Amino acid sequence: MSLLAPFEAFPVEHLAAGVITEGKEYTLGDTDREFELASVTKLLATYGFLLACEEEVFTLDSPCGPATVRHLLAHASGVGFRSDDATRPAEQRRVYSSYGFELLAQQLEQETQMTFAEYLHEAVFVPLGMDATVLWGSPGHEARSTLSDMLRFAHELIDPQLLHPSTLEQAFEVQFPTLDGVVPGYGMQKPCPWGLGFEIKGEKSPHWTGAEMPQDTVGHFGQSGTFLWLAPKQRRAAVMLSDRDFGAWAKPLWQETNDALWQSLQEGK
């Protein structure tokens, strides 16, 4: 049985999925079809912001908006999902926010005198060969890409060439570990671990990654029906892109599928 066979039964019109294990890629579907990423966009944007930190455009602890770059990347700044949502004090609650990524982009644009879309294209997409990937709007949820491009990005997460490995390790570490918060679609999580831009599975239950997957699994899912996860120690990653919005249909199916995939990977199938 193919590693990706569980994805074949997804009730979607179009789907492309891929997994990386032991340096090899396995794919299903049209690898060059473009899909909206929704909040998986945040992972690409995060890479741009972390590169900006290494290039000393700003630091993780530079002031930005009502808090710092670190707070905004970790959803700990207190700003809401949108610009007109109520704001809490920083470090009080894990408040999931796309607006926080927009504030980060605005700060970068002020410092570099170029749009964040241009910066991300030149700093991340061009060197990784992600020719089909475009940030067309909010850095929090408005990019489109292909499976081929997202697998290129996943390889970078496994074996970073653009970022120093220590920078990426920090992105995968829980920031402000005591914070509770809501994972969209999954409710309140106590605690709600998050790294720098990357969601961390931890002990969250239920969760879109498999129940049997490592607690240090990192990644993100998007409301457009997309996800990317990485198991750093095992050097494994998976990407799923589809054209059916996340909803009740996806919650048990994604977890069951990722569990089946993880079991197959563990068994070396």
Image (cartoon, rainbow, N blue to C red):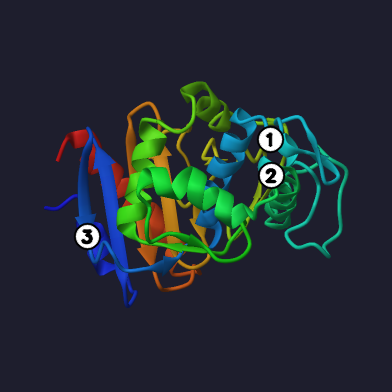
Query: What amino acid is labelled 3 in the image?
Result: Leu
Q: Contact, CB < 8 Å: mark 3 with mark 2?
A: no
Left or right: where 36 falls relative to 75? left
Mark 2 or 1, nearer chain start: 1
- Check disc 1 and report its element: helix, strand or loop: loop
Say which residue label 2 marks.
112
Residue positioned 27% across, 42% down in the render: 20
The crowd level at tag 3 (other Cα within 10 Å; few <14, some 14-19, many 20+) is some
**Farthest residue, direction top:** 166
Instruction: Look at discs 3 and 2 and give the one toward the viewer.
Output: 2
Residue positioned 49% across, 25% down in the render: 164
Say which residue label 1 marks.
57
Query: What amino acid is labelled 1 in the image?
Result: Val
The picture places residue 105, in percent across and down from the top left corner, at 68, 51
The part of the image, by quadrant, that contains residue 235 is top left
**Closest to the observer, 142 or 201:** 142
Instruction: Look at discs 2 and 1 and give the one toward the viewer.
Output: 2
Query: What amino acid is labelled 2 in the image?
Result: Thr
The part of the image, by quadrant, that contains residue 24 is top left
The picture places residue 33, in percent across and down from the top left corner, at 31, 68
- How far is mark 3 from mark 2, CA to CA? 39 Å
The picture places residue 116, in percent across and down from the top left corner, at 62, 53
Left or right: where 114 falls relative to 119? right
**Farthest residue, direction front:** 113
Instruction: Look at discs 1 and 3 and give the one toward the viewer.
Output: 1
**Closest to the observer, 86 or 141:** 141
- How far is mark 2 from mark 1, CA to CA? 7 Å
Say which residue label 3 marks.
28
- Check disc 3 and report its element: helix, strand or loop: strand
- Check disc 2 and report its element: helix, strand or loop: helix
Q: Contact, CB < 8 Å: mark 2 with mark 1?
A: yes
